[in-house]
Image (cartoon, rainbow, N blue to C red):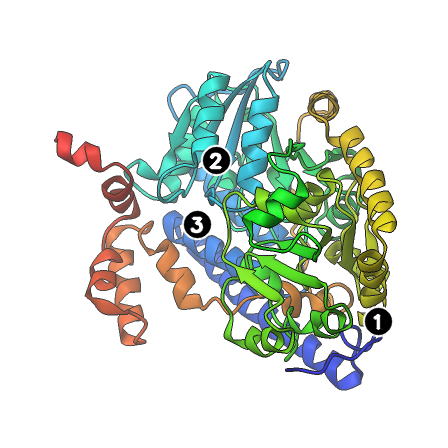
Amino acid sequence: MATIASGHHQDGTRGADETARRAGRIRSNFSAFDARVREAERRAASGDLEGAAVEAAIAATLAAHRHCGVFASPRLERVTAQIGRRLEPQPDHGPAPEPAPFRRVLHVCTQLAPVGGLTKMLALWIGADANRTNGLALTQHRGPVDARITEAVRASGGTIHHLNHRQGGKLAWARELRRVARDYDVVVLHIHCEDVVPLIAFADPARHPPVLLLNHADHLFWIGARISHAVINLREAARRLANTRRGVDPARSLLLPTLITLPERQRNRTAAKRALGIPEEDILLVSVARGAKYRNVGPVTYADRHVDLLAAHPNARLIVVGAGARADWAPAQAATGGRITAYAEQADPRVFFEAADIYVDSYPFVSSTSMLEAAAYGLPLVTRFEAPEAAEIVAINHPGLDATARVARDQAEYEAHLTALITDAETRRAAGSGISAAIARLYAPASWLAGLDAVYAQARALPRLAPDAGPVIAEAPHLGEPDLRHQDMFGSDFPVSGMTKNYIGMLPLRQRVASWAALRRAGDLSGPWERVRLLLPEWLVRNVKDRPGLLRAG
């Protein structure tokens, strides 16, 4: 089991050599990103718009997975704007009317995972907004749509549009999105960081309804600032980063808290513990998040960080929901006599929140949605922030949590916070009641809906977004905070070949075959089914997999 040191030196600046290593990694990542942007520019200039769209998507995917010192790219958005303006117009695609009251809302998503805060927030959003019609367009969804979403859209009187069921690739889907949006008063983007389809569809702000972008991935690179009539941030730290690092006009940078469910307990704590097979007298620490949020920091696992604490408190145990089985957690689990338990991701983790005495945040990737849910259950909260203030975007500082969660700046303080809560029931009760009161005040449906109405009113009052015809400024990687620590906390090793596979089905046949052949030469094709599947157009694969009844009917 890895030894854990206390103090800022663990995750802070680790000396000149470490800083130089991280800076070199940023430069290398930026070089790869820049090469992809240049290729997208080259293809757009040559008239290969489909190829340019895919290259732009790969460039953005690269920047989102391998931080390259920028949080936005005006150059890349200039490419998507050029593509969008060169699409042949629809027959009825004239200038958009002046903004009407926002009564018909089109939400646009890339893909909605069954587990995760984005899907949950969208379902709650549509459900809470009962006085408007809410429709949904999905640009690249794969598989069935979560029942919470389909029911919310149906109850709202809206329609779900599967753009990638339409024959063609990104340009065809952008044309269809452009057409669909004409029936709505406002468009709200809940898209993935790399989704170019809305950027192409809404390239000309004079010809479509206002576009609002939800900044749900506020810690990552994303594209879309250029087409956004306004950006909706979920916290002040995100708004500051949007203004300073993404080039968002402060007047167009709005604030709306995350929407959560204020829970009604189905069980008391004793009954919930019993359902999990945990003795009533044990003090239960719970953490809930996607598995990626529990990555190791160097050799230290999330489980390792709790070994000394649990050794000092034999009546305490930790359950981590979302981490799943991990071999490198075994030493910590053995050292604590099995008092660290990891579960796979759960679509409904209610019983774990109900059983918990204390909620501990994921690390190194915090989980604001889970922290808010735990707060709504009245649980005392502990999170870690071991970085300089300039890296505030990696911390928990969301409305309702910023003044109530206990924040540890190092391992010793983390253990001290948890020890105080483990050993004193009254401290737990007082902390939890203060947190739940703050959450109820800010996140009650009526309060949140008033906030949404205010955001819509602010957005409608803004002047129409002007086309960006100015020069594209030079982009250079930033080598300070939070960039230096970003890759270690949030990055991935998603290979470029994987990115290519993700988009290959959206290319025209000749280019698809050429990309397929390049993957084959590089040895990146695995198995006969993948060899066949990657030659098929994405729209066909999606219709076969997502709409099997269509084939049977035929």
Residue 385 can be seen, yes or no? yes
Calculate the distance from the C-alpha at mark 1 to the C-alpha at mark 3.
Answer: 49 Å
Q: What's the amino acid at mark 3?
A: Ala
Q: Residue at x 58, y 30 (%)?
A: 124
Q: Position of residue 284 (x, y in %)?
A: 69, 56
Which quarter of the figure is the N terminus placed in?
bottom right
Calculate the distance from the C-alpha at mark 2 to the C-alpha at mark 1.
Answer: 51 Å
Task: Please give the label number shown on residue 83.
Answer: none
- Judged from the image, the secondary structure of the residue bearing numbered disc 3 is helix
Residue that carries the numbered disc 2 in the rendered image: 201
- Judged from the image, the secondary structure of the residue bearing numbered disc 1 is helix
Q: Residue at x 35, y 60 (%)?
A: 501
Quadrant position of residue 283: bottom right
Q: What's the amino acid at mark 2?
A: Ala
10 Å crowding of disc 1: few (<14), some (14-19), many (20+): some
Side of 350 relative to 500 (left or right):
right
Task: Please give the label number shown on residue 412.
Answer: 1
Name the N-terminal-most of marks 3 and 2.
Answer: 3
Q: Taking 320 as reference, is 338 above or below it?
A: below
Name the N-terminal-most of marks 1 and 3.
Answer: 3
Q: What's the amino acid at mark 1?
A: Ala
Q: Taking 205 as reference, is 342 above or below it?
A: below
Q: Position of residue 142 (x, y in %)?
A: 37, 45
Q: Residue at x 71, y 62 (%)?
A: 316
For the residues carrying marks 2 and 1, which lies nearer the camera in this image?
1
Q: Position of residue 430 (x, y in %)?
A: 87, 44
Residue 387 can be seen, yes or no? no
Q: Taking 499 as reference, is 265 above or below it?
A: above
Tag 2 and tag 1, C-beta contact below 8 Å:
no
Name the N-terminal-most of marks 2 and 1.
Answer: 2
Side of 36 relative to 431 (left or right):
left
Task: Please give the label number shown on residue 53.
Answer: 3
